[in-house]
Structure formats: structure tokens, C-alpha cells
């Protein structure tokens, strides 16, 4: 860099847009990029400080609250839709509301879990977070969704598996509380993808062979060379784009990525347990949430699942839980064992 | 995340490179996480002084935030031999605006960056 000018004299350029803008990006793209991180630090510092509203006292009924940050980075923002109210007409608000409902229903109707903590905890989401903000996250209390920049990313509520992914982080927080680093972090991410895709598949009433096993399909605009953020069936093949780079996920322990980036590769190495779940589900057939899903859910809530568990420990527990639920010599135990062998976690 | 030395930031002087990167989020995109470089040899004394004060201020900022899929800024100082001699990670929402301003205008590092998270050696101009 030629650092001869004061920083404020130059426009905002996120890294993935810099090259494009430098080679003749559109004025709109420049404007989107300029706003993404230009926010008031007083607001930003408040993230994670939200007090939750009342939850649901009736098992089987969720308690949803959808807020809008109105393009600011303040949480939770203005309350726009609460439990039982009709569609607002705002796609992001309504997608969040229905996505939370679909996720609640999977956990309740299949696994008899009453919200994130099994005690009816309020489901709180904020949409329209930031200006053209390209991310979604769980802040420890609630889900947060950006609108995307419209150039590379659409709004983050567009894919129900993204909504379910963020909610599942909340479930994990109340159960194993897996550390968010290295293999434990990759398991945290993988579990969120697993229940994310189960919500999507159940909503679509898909059998395993009908499902696409993609995470975040629809999030990319047509300008991106990619199908989705991740592929559980074929990790490493979801996108290959000049600006985003190539999907870095491995699908086998032989390709485990050792890195300090991304909290030790939590969004990278999750490809390995993701593929293990896909293989187990495909071997069992039918609806993935019914047998493979039960094994993974039992493991998620298993008291033996330590915060710093690695892939091998998790794989061992899935085998044990498959045996407990379906029998030691069951088809489920065999499918789970073979899946972990296929990805190189078990010998 | 990093296990590189934190604490008091070393002096910014010609030959050293300050690397800034934004990591994390819902997915890891290698193209977006690529670090950006500020070559100290190309900075004026006033700019170096401003940057030095910024690094000093980083040590009092929380390293991370609760939750998952959040973005963070990674700041690393690389010496003349290409070794990381100091680094710090701050949550996106806690990153100082001047740091974001520098990040916005810093040049993107070589696309051949290693995937192990270490920083490439880069000869100062």
C-alpha cells in the first residue's frame, strides 16, 4: 500500500470487493461496500446485551419475537412481529418468523424439545441488521441476520437452514456447550448444519435421496460461481468463485486443515462430520431426521459429550447412542460406524 | 484466533509489515479472509505514530464476543524476516473505526497465502 494519504480520504472497500471495484466496479457496489462497516461503535458495542422477553409456558408452543434493526447495528431493534401475529409483508421478518417456527417444530415434534433450553426459552431474532451487512450470527441470546449486499449475498433469512443453523447454536449452548475452536468448534458448526438441513428436509418432506444436502442455497446472488455455502454430501464443492475463493472444506481426515484462521477451522473442518452424517443418513434411507437425526440428537444432549470433544470422541458417542436407541446389532449402529470409517475418523 | 505473542506491541519501523484481516462469519471464504498489508516503510512518521497508538489501544479491547459465526479482526505485526512478532484479535463490533479505515485502504496480500493461517513472508519494498 502506498500509505501517503490519511485513511479517511479513501472509500470503504471490503476485501472481497476491492479487486472488483479496482477493476471497474459499479457505483452501487461502491456505495454498498462503503456502508457495510461504517457503523456507530456505541451501537455495535451493545451486541449480546439483550434481555430476553418471556418464553413459552406451554410445551409444544413457541414464543417468537422478530425485531428489525432498521439498518443499524443495534440489538434487538424494533419489535415487528410476535407469536400469533400474521404476516408483515416484509420478507425478512416473515422468513425469520416462519424459519424459527419450522426449527421449533423439528425439535419439538421429533425430539420433544421445548425450545433451545427445553424450558420454552423465547426465540428472538433481529433482521435488517446493519446496512448491506453480509453475515448471520448467534450472539449468545438471539439470532441476527443481515440483508446482504445484494451484489454477492442475498438476505440471510432466505434459506431456512441458515435460520435453523443459528438456532441450533443456541441448543448446543444449553447442552454440550462445545468450545468454538478446532475440532470441538467444527463439531459445533457441523451439528448446526445437521439440524439446519434436517429442518429444511422436513419442511420439504424430502427423503434422503431427494435432498440436496446444501447449506445456504439461495444465499448467493447469480453473480457468484457457487451453489451454496457448503455441501454436506460433497464438502469442498459448494463454490469456486474469483472473489470468494474455493470452498475449503475437506470431506476426509486425510485432508484435515490445520489452521489458526476461522477459530481453528471451525467452518472448514466441519465438512468431515457433515459428510459422516450424510453417509449415515443415506445408508439408512427414509427421512434423515428419523433415525440418523435421532442418533445425532441423542449425542448432542449426551452428558458425556465434553466441551472439548474431538471427532473421534463424538463418533464413539454416536455409535453408543445408536446402540442404546436401536440396539447393539442394529442397522443404525452399522451405518454410523461405516460413515465415520468412510471419512477416516474411525479405523 | 491466535497464539502469537500479545501484550505490548513492538515498535513499528521500516521493514515491518502490519497485516489486517477480517475472519469468521457464517462461512469461511478464503477470498474474503485474505489479509491486507500496511508496509511501514511506506508510511510517514505521523502515520506510524497513529498506527502505533492504535496498536496500543487494541490491548484493552475484548478479544472476542459471545456466540457463534461472528466476525473478528486479526492484526499482526510481521518483522523483516517474515515472522509474526505480535498479534491481536478483536471482535468486529469492538474494532476501532480508525483500524477499519486502515483495513479498508490496505492492499490485499498475495493470493498464494498459506492456508495454515501463518503469514507469508513479504519483502519490504
Image (spheres, grey):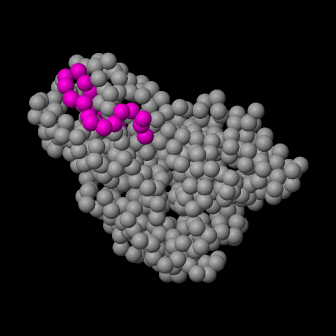
A276 displayed left or right of A255:
right
In the rendered image, residue B116 lying in the magenta stretch gets the answer no
View extreme (front): residue: B7
| Residue A307, percent from left and from top | 58, 50
Q: Please provide the residue range marked out in magenta.
A: B1-21
| Residue A313, percent from left and from top | 68, 43
Looking at the rendered image, the quarter that the N terminus of chain A falls into is top left
Q: Nearer the viewer, residue A271 or A244?
A: A271
- Find residue A76 and report its image quarter: bottom left
In the rendered image, residue B12 lying in the magenta stretch gets the answer yes
B2 displayed left or right of B104:
right
- Residue at (27%, 36%) from the top-left corner? B8
- Residue at (55%, 46%) from the top-left corner? A185
| Residue B86, percent from left and from top | 32, 32
A273 displayed left or right of A12:
right
| Residue A332, percent from left and from top | 82, 50
Q: Nearer the viewer, residue A212 or B120?
A: B120
- Residue at (71%, 58%) from the top-left corner? A298
Q: Nearer the viewer, residue A154 or A340?
A: A340
Work out whether A142 lies above or below A182.
Answer: below
Using the rendered image of the protein, determine whether residue B96 is visible from the camera's viewpoint. yes
Magenta: main secondary structure equals: loop
Work out whether A3 lies above or below A150.
Answer: above
Amino acid at each position: 500500500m502506498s500509505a501517503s494519504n490519511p485513511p479517511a480520504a479513501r472509500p470503504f472497500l471490503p476485501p472481497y470487493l476491492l479487486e472488483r471495484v479496482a477493476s471497474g466496479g459499479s457505483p452501487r457496489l461502491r456505495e454498498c461496500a462503503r456502508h457495510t462497516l461504517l457503523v456507530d461503535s456505541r451501537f455495535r458495542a451493545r451486541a449480546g446485551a439483550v434481555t430476553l422477553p418471556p418464553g413459552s409456558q406451554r410445551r409444544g408452543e413457541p414464543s417468537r419475537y422478530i425485531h428489525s434493526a432498521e439498518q443499524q447495528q443495534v440489538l434487538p431493534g424494533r419489535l415487528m412481529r410476535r407469536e400469533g401475529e400474521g404476516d408483515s409483508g416484509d420478507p425478512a421478518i416473515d422468513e425469520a418468523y416462519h424459519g424459527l417456527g419450522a426449527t421449533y417444530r423439528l425439535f419439538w415434534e421429533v425430539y420433544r424439545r421445548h425450545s433451545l433450553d427445553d424450558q420454552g426459552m423465547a426465540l428472538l431474532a433481529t433482521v435488517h441488521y446493519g446496512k448491506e451487512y453480509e453475515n448471520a450470527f448467534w450472539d449468545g441470546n438471539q439470532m441476527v441476520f443481515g440483508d446482504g449486499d445484494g451484489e454477492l449475498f442475498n438476505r440471510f433469512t432466505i434459506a431456512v437452514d441458515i435460520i435453523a443453523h443459528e438456532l441450533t447454536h443456541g441448543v448446543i449452548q444449553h447442552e454440550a456447550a462445545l468450545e468454538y475452536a478446532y475440532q470441538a468448534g467444527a463439531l459445533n458448526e457441523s451439528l448446526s448444519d445437521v439440524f439446519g438441513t434436517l429442518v429444511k428436509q422436513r419442511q420439504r418432506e424430502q427423503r434422503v435421496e431427494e435432498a440436496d444436502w446444501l447449506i445456504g442455497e439461495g444465499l448467493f446472488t447469480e453473480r457468484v460461481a457457487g451453489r451454496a455455502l457448503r455441501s454436506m454430501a460433497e464438502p469442498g464443492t459448494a463454490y469456486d468463485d474469483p472473489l470468494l475463493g474455493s470452498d475449503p472444506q475437506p470431506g476426509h481426515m486425510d485432508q484435515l486443515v490445520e489452521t489458526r484462521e476461522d477459530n481453528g477451522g471451525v467452518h472448514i473442518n466441519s465438512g468431515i462430520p457433515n459428510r459422516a452424517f450424510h453417509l449415515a443418513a443415506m445408508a439408512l434411507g427414509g427421512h434423515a431426521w428419523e433415525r440418523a437425526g435421532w442418533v445425532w440428537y441423542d449425542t448432542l444432549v449426551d452428558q458425556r459429550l465434553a466441551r472439548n470433544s474431538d471427532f473421534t470422541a463424538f463418533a464413539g458417542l454416536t455409535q453408543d447412542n445408536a446402540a442404546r436407541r436401536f440396539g447393539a446389532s442394529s442397522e443404525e449402529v452399522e451405518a454410523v460406524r461405516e460413515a465415520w470409517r468412510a471419512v477416516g475418523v474411525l479405523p | 484466533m491466535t497464539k502469537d505473542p500479545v501484550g505490548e506491541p513492538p515498535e513499528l519501523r521500516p521493514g515491518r509489515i502490519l497485516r489486517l484481516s477480517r475472519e469468521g462469519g457464517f462461512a469461511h471464504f478464503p477470498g474474503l479472509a485474505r489479509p491486507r498489508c500496511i508496509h511501514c516503510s511506506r508510511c510517514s512518521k505521523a502515520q506510524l505514530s497513529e498506527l502505533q497508538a492504535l496498536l496500543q489501544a487494541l490491548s484493552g479491547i475484548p478479544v472476542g464476543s459471545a456466540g457463534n459465526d461472528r466476525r473478528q479482526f486479526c492484526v499482526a505485526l510481521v518483522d523483516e524476516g517474515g515472522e509474526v512478532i505480535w498479534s491481536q484479535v478483536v471482535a468486529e463490533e469492538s474494532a476501532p473505526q480508525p483500524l477499519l479505515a486502515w483495513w479498508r485502504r490496505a492492499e490485499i496480500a498475495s493470493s498464494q497465502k498459506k492456508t495454515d493461517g501463518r503469514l507469508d513472508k513479504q519483502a519490504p519494498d
